[in-house]
Each structure stands twice: as structure tokens, then as C-alpha cells.
Image (cartoon, rainbow, N blue to C red):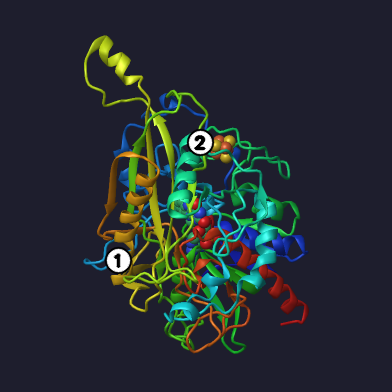
Amino acid sequence: MPSKSQTTFDVLVVGSGASGGWACKRLAEAGVKIALLEAGRPQADANFSEHKPEFQLKYRNLAPEIVSKTRPIQSKFEVCSEYNYDWFVNDIEEPYTTPADKPFDWMGRLRMTGGRTNVWGRVSLRFSEADFKAASHDGYDTDWPLGYKELAPYYDLVEKYVGVTGIAEGLDHLPDGQFQPPMPLTCHETLFRNHVKEKLGRTVTLARSANLTRPLNGRGPCHFCGPCERGCVTHSYFNSAFTTVADALVTGNCTLISNAMAYKVLMDADRNRARGVLYIDRNTHQPHEVTARTVILCAQAQESARILLNSATTQYPNGLGNSSGALGHYLTAHTRSGGGRGEFPALGEKPSRGAPVKPVGIYIARFRNLKGNPPHKKFIRGYGYEGGSNVDFSWNASGFGDAYKKAILEPRVSFEITGFGEVLPRWDNFVEIDPNVKDIYGIPVLKIHLSDGENERAMIQDMGDSAGEMLEAAGAKNIRTYANPSAPRWALHEAGIARMGIDPKKSVLNQFQQSHDIKNLYVMDASAFTANPCQNPTLTIMALCVRSCDFLMQEMKKGA
Ligand SMILES: Cc1cc2nc3c(=O)[nH]c(=O)nc-3n(C[C@H](O)[C@H](O)[C@H](O)COP(=O)(O)OP(=O)(O)OC[C@H]3O[C@@H](n4cnc5c(N)ncnc54)[C@H](O)[C@@H]3O)c2cc1C
Ligand code: SF4
């Protein structure tokens, strides 16, 4: 029998990452009593290792097999290393499955307060009106149930708090925000920016990024040490553990319950209302119930969908709040399989092992299929690029002795850009519960079906070709482009699967991320996205979450 909490909270939030952190901050600061269930351990500055040299690690960061033994999937992405691998899910204990012909690497699964914001790349871009209304433009699928003007004030609010360094460019399709002063571009990034604009009319800008350049709310400006994914004792990048969640806890209105793996949402079937959550304590493996008047899922897109699917009842046999049948469907995740790299002559730079490291590169704004431009013949929607320049020693120089010592000091400037492309929402990209597999806590796991279609394949080819075109325009040498087959598939920007929409017969949530079926149940992470434009999702996740919390508080005042 599960033990039961003594208190009934106003709101129960599952997950303390980008979305959950904001839900807790917004509600707790307004006086709402919250329980925050987080599967991971508490995060603390003592865990941060951004200034720790490799020689102080037990295996000098040179034994990847130590990491991959328990994190074979997580360690495929370089941010998971000997420094921080215990922040990530143990892939053996918490597996998922895929069909044999659709391999998918579900990376970036964190088990710490702060979730993915502990290790994220921090690129923070707004969606535009054209993104929210893309279906009206090209006729594919459906528009979002809200537009840019409804979200703009929330983008402002979130950016001012998060601290986003950026350059205003005046582009309709990549709206400017409330930026902190920009970090400088390197000489080569500036050269690339200028040539690409002059010759091709495309906008290369600083990757708008959640790294401070000015002090903010007790957080210090970035001091360019480099590896943000290992934490930051000056709190200079945005991590919900030391920002939104910390603010919520300070109010005294938010109770953090760590190591609490939410299994299912509990229902009061007679009233058709959520009444709390059943969770498994990760240390004791014992079940517990926490009750609340409203439940908000913020566990990351697939994790929230898993909880809803595992919460099926007689009334909702295909998953909670799934009268539409859309729950689990329309999984999207950016494709990053096209790009290019080249080399530039050094402009006076010298390589160094201890130089400052700028943690922010460049972003190339989308230029395909914009309003007013002729549509691309082979694909709809678009892509942007992230990238930047890097000065290094000529490690591959030839020769021996003095000649080699001299040659290795010749600076080598490499420049790389990687496309981030929109993947169309499709019914046949979906998640379901695998009836045959449970995790170590006894919770049924997800089976994930994701593959690219014709549109994505054509887009990937264009990403590679256009990367070559831009590197050439900027005068790069030794250009190598790539447009790889898009399997095995992996992702860090998953969205969809509990989509918002106007029509309850075709969508799971309304524009305030409230279940169409169950009025006191909300899903405020990216699973609510109707589509997944090429810009990175997290700024929009946070802005939507704050807007939905404001709606929820109005509902609570009405006694709903
Ligand atoms: C390496 C990397 C780089 C990235 N770079 C960028 C970028 O540059 N820009 C960008 O916009 N986005 C980026 N992202 C994506 C970004 O981190 C996510 O979009 C964002 O953090 C999602 O927020 P969330 O609240 O949905 O989930 P998360 O931030 O992942 O938080 C979810 C939390 O829920 C907890 N949880 C999960 N399941 C349960 C459960 N059953 N019970 C209780 N708790 C649970 C987890 O432990 C976690 O703490 C990146 C991600 C990664 C991994
Ligand atoms: S580079 Fe800046 S934000 Fe990143 S860890 Fe270092 S100081 Fe913090």
C-alpha cells in the first residue's frame, strides 16, 4: 500500500527543469502551495566541476568505458563525461525500447534538480508569428492555437530573468528579445557574418544564449571558463536549479520532494478530476501518494507522455486525457544531420591551452521558405545553423623534433556549422508503452518510434549544400560538407505528443496547456507543442509555461 502525504497541496508539479522550475517560481511567488516531485537528486554548487582539471579525476577523463558501462546512450553526446555522468539517467536501470528498424538515441535524460538545464547548450531563440501560423502558409498540418502577440510579453519576462546575450537583428522570422549586451564574435565569426550577408543576404548573428554578460539577481557575469555543462559556481548560465527552483524554495511555499519517480496521475473518477500523483521513491523503491488540487506535468516531453499513458483508467483506457487519441503522436525532434566545416588563415591569433573560452558561438537565421520568398522545390519549413570558429594547434603537423615543435605551433583555425532543421509532425512518429519492459522501479517504459521522412531528407541535403556555399562565400579553405542519412536518429529537442489545439477531438491540450478532458490537469513542457520550428525550443517552453500558470491562477481564483 502506498504511503499517503498528510498535506493536500494547491498544485503538484512533476519535474524541476526548464518548465517545472518556472511553474514553481511563478506559482510559489504568488502564494500558491506547491509540491515539486523530482526524480533526481538535489543539485548544489559543490557538484560543479567547471574549473577542475582532468588530472584530478580518477580516470583523467580518459576511460569512456567507465561512463558507457552504465550510460551507453547518454555518453554518446560529449556533454556526458567522467565529470558529470552521475547526473544522467542510468540507461540500464531506466531503459526504453525502439523498433529494430528505427533506432533512436534518447540522450540528455537528467536525474538532478534542474533537469536538462544543467547541461543544455543555452541557445535561446524566439519563435515568430510565421512559426505559429506555418500551416496557414504552406498548408501542412495545423496552426498553433495561439500566436506571437499572445506570447511576446512572456518572452520579455522570461528573457529579463534568464539573462540572454544577443544582438538585435530586426528579423520578422527571428524576433529580437530583451538582450543583455552581446558577447563579442571572434574575428573569423565577424568575417563570416559580413561575407555571408554581403554575398548571400543571409543573417549570421551571435547565438542568442542564456549566459550573463552583466550581473543579474546575485548571479555573476560569465568569466569564459568554457565547460558550462559541468555547472557554474558564479551561476552565470541559466540552470533552473539555482534560479527558478531556488527562488520558489525561498518563498517557503514550495516543497521539493527529491528522488521521486512519478508513476501515474491519480484520478477521482466520479468528479473527473486529477487528485494527485503516485510516485516511487528511487532510494527505497516504495510507493507514495501526494495529493493536490491541480497537477502539472513538466517532466520533459517523452517523460510526461509516459506518465499520462501509464495513468490509463477505465474512463481513459488509452491514456489519461486521451479522448482525442492524439496522445503519444506527432513526436518531432530537430534533425542535425547536415552541415559543413572549413579552415581559415589565422588573423594574428595564437593557440593556447589555457586561453579564455567563449561559451557562445554563432547562429545562422533560417533563410528557406520565408514569406515573400519563392518556396524551395523539395521541402517545406526550414532550418538554421549553430557553429563557430576554433583556433587550435596543428596537431597533425608532419615532421620530428624541432621541426615538429615549430610546426605544431602554427595556428589552425577551423570553422564549423551544423544545421538544426524542423521535423514535420506526423502521426506515425509516436511513443507508446512497451507492455514487456519495466524500469528498475517497476514502471512500464516507453517504446519510441521516430524516423525522418522525405521532407527531412531533402532538407538535410540542402543543409549540407548551403553550408558549403556559405563557407565558400566567406573564403574558407578545405571545405568539407556532410548530409548524412538520418538514422540512427537522436535528439535533444523533442516536442509534440500531447499537442495543443483548438479542437478537443484532434488535440490533447488547449492553448493554456490544460487538458481538454480533465480541467485540473496541465502539461507544461514541450510535449504541448503543436509543431517544432527550427529554433531551439526552451525559451518558448518557459514563456508558454509562465503564461499557462497565469491562466491557472485565474482559474483557481474562480474556484475551478
Ligand atoms: C546537451 C543538451 C543541449 C541542449 N541545448 C539546448 C539549447 O541550446 N537550446 C535549447 O533551447 N534547448 C536545448 N536543449 C534542450 C533543453 O535542455 C530542453 O528543451 C529543456 O530543458 C526541457 O525542459 P523540460 O522542463 O521539459 O525538461 P527538463 O529540463 O529535462 O526537466 C525535466 C525534469 O523532470 C524530471 N523527471 C523526468 N521524469 C520524471 C518522473 N517520472 N517523475 C519525476 N520527475 C521526472 C527529470 O529528472 C528532470 O529533472 C538541450 C538539451 C541537452 C540535453
Ligand atoms: S563559461 Fe561562463 S557560464 Fe559557462 S561555466 Fe564558465 S563562467 Fe559559467
Q: Judge from the rendering whether residue 348 lies leftward or rightward of residue 159; answer left or right.
A: left
Residue, far front: 199
Give above or below for 205 relative to 28.
above
Give the secondary structure at mark 1: helix
Give me the disc on residue 95: none
Which image quarter: residue 330?
Answer: bottom left
At horizontal 33% and vertical 31% (from top left) the residue drawn is 62
Q: Is residue 260 visible?
A: no
Give above or below for 538 relative to 454.
above
Give me the disc on residue 458: 1
Give how far apart the Cα atoms at labels 1 and 2 are: 32 Å
Instruction: Give yes or no for contact between labels 1 and 2 (Cβ–Cβ under 8 Å).
Output: no
The residue closer to the viewer here, 340 or 422, is 340
User: Of label 1 and label 2, which has the lower sequence position?
Assistant: 2
Residue, far top: 402
Q: Judge from the rendering whether residue 218 lies leftward or rightward of residue 299; answer left or right.
A: right
- Neighbours of disc 1 within 10 Å: few (<14), some (14-19), many (20+): some
Q: Quadrant of the C terminus?
A: bottom right
Q: Amino acid at mark 1?
A: Ala
Report the residue marked by disc 2.
186
Q: Is residue 295 visible?
A: yes
How far across and how far down the image is residue 138, in percent?
44, 78
Displayed-image quarter of ligand 2: top right
